[in-house]
Amino acid sequence: MPNKSRGGPGKAPKMFLFRVDIDSVSGLLRGVPRILSILDRLDMEGTFYSIMGWEGDLISSLRHRFLRSRRGIPGGASGASWGMGPVRLLEHSRCLLYPVKIPALGSGLLNEIRGGGHCLGVHGYVHVRWHSPSPRELEEEFEKMTLAFRDLTGESPRAIATPLGHDGPGVRKLVARHNFKTLTGLGGDPELVDTGDGSLPFVYIPVNVDSIEFLRTSGISRKGTYERITRKILEAERAHGLASLYVHPRYEGSHEIELLEKVLSFVRDEGIETGTHLQFADAFKNGGAG
Ligand SMILES: [Zn+2]
């Protein structure tokens, strides 16, 4: 229900948003189907952001991750906390030598996402390049990921989550130039972004609830994680009209699937409205009448 007291453009509608970053082969194949079936059971929408190329290859990894990656990377977004057991090492070696294109491998799953009432957006072309991209490489990433999305779906992508929470004036100009309607990042407030060059403004959507991955890898128990996240969801709803959570299929979709289902069930039981990032952006522009 629209809340009149919150009216006016740029006001957040009361909503819970669920974001899923697909940035690994194992996350795609193992985690995404499980997450989709939870959302199906709870009749809830999600916004999935997928790599449109591959995770990393030997040359890109050497250049961006190991040699040039001195620029600041926001914590909890790099996936570096997942450890390097023998299986991970094997998977890493395979990805480095024989990169697999995520859309080619997962076209069935990605189309299932789109057909299931969810939103599919993009999450870079080669993920590892976002550790230390030059302006030229950023432009290339935008070109390639939007082209690959059109090859897959026949449509232009409208929602973007940049790998590693990459943001800044350069990124925002490219987001506007490619006609995205939403950019999601880590932290900040929802805002209508006008890059000032006459292009259409888009809506910035923050993640504002601690992730399960962040809390669990900080040593907090499952019970403590559940309590902290559900409390934060209610606080964020009350303070900003928006609670926004994000997960990685490789982590939550594989290791914490029961906890994730419990958290999403809490949202459903509380009667909090849910929507995709694009639905939120439309409602936000129209002054909260979602
Ligand atoms: Zn990512």
Image (tube, rainbow, N blue to C red):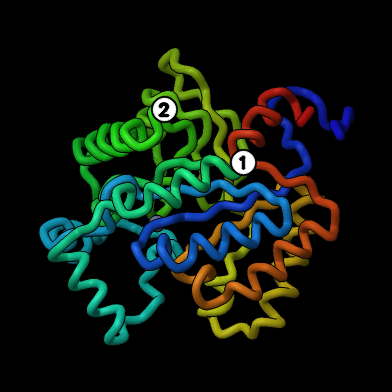
Distance from Cα at disc 1 to Cα at disc 2: 16 Å
Question: Vertical placement of 208 versus 11: above or below?
Answer: below
Q: Is residue 170 visible?
A: no
> In the rendered view, does 153 fall on the left or right side of 62?
right
Q: Position of residue 77 (x, y in %)?
A: 43, 62
Instruction: Work out whether 43 lies above or below 11.
Output: below
Residue toward you, 171 or 119: 119
As drawn, is 88 to the left or to the right of 164?
left
Return the disc, 1 or 2, that comes first in the chain's sequence. 1
Q: Is residue 29 above or below residue 173?
A: below
Q: Which residue is under mark 2? A: 155
Q: Secondary structure at mark 1?
A: loop
In the depicted structure, whether residue 204 falls above or below residue 264: above
Q: Which residue is at 61% across, 64% downward?
A: 210
Quarter residue 15 falls in: top right
Dot 2: few (<14), some (14–19), or many (≥20) neighbours within 10 Å? few
- Other residues around mark 1 within 10 Å, as few (<14) / some (14–19) / many (≥20): some
Q: Can residue 34 be seen from the camera position used here?
A: yes
Q: Quadrant of ligand 1?
A: bottom left
Q: Position of residue 93 (x, y in %)?
A: 18, 73
At horizontal 55% and vertical 65% (from top left) the residue drawn is 34
Q: Secondary structure at mark 2?
A: loop
Please name whichever residue, 277 or 35, is drawn nearer the observer in this view of the structure. 35
Q: Amino acid at mark 2?
A: Glu
Which residue is located at x 64 percent, y 69 percent? 260
Query: Which residue is identified by label 1?
Result: 117
Amino acid, disc 1: Gly
- Residue at 24% of width from left, 52% of height from top? 129
Give the quarter of the figure containing the N terminus: top right
Q: Nearer the viewer, residue 98 or 226?
A: 98
Q: Are marks 1 and 2 in contact (CB under 8 Å)?
A: no
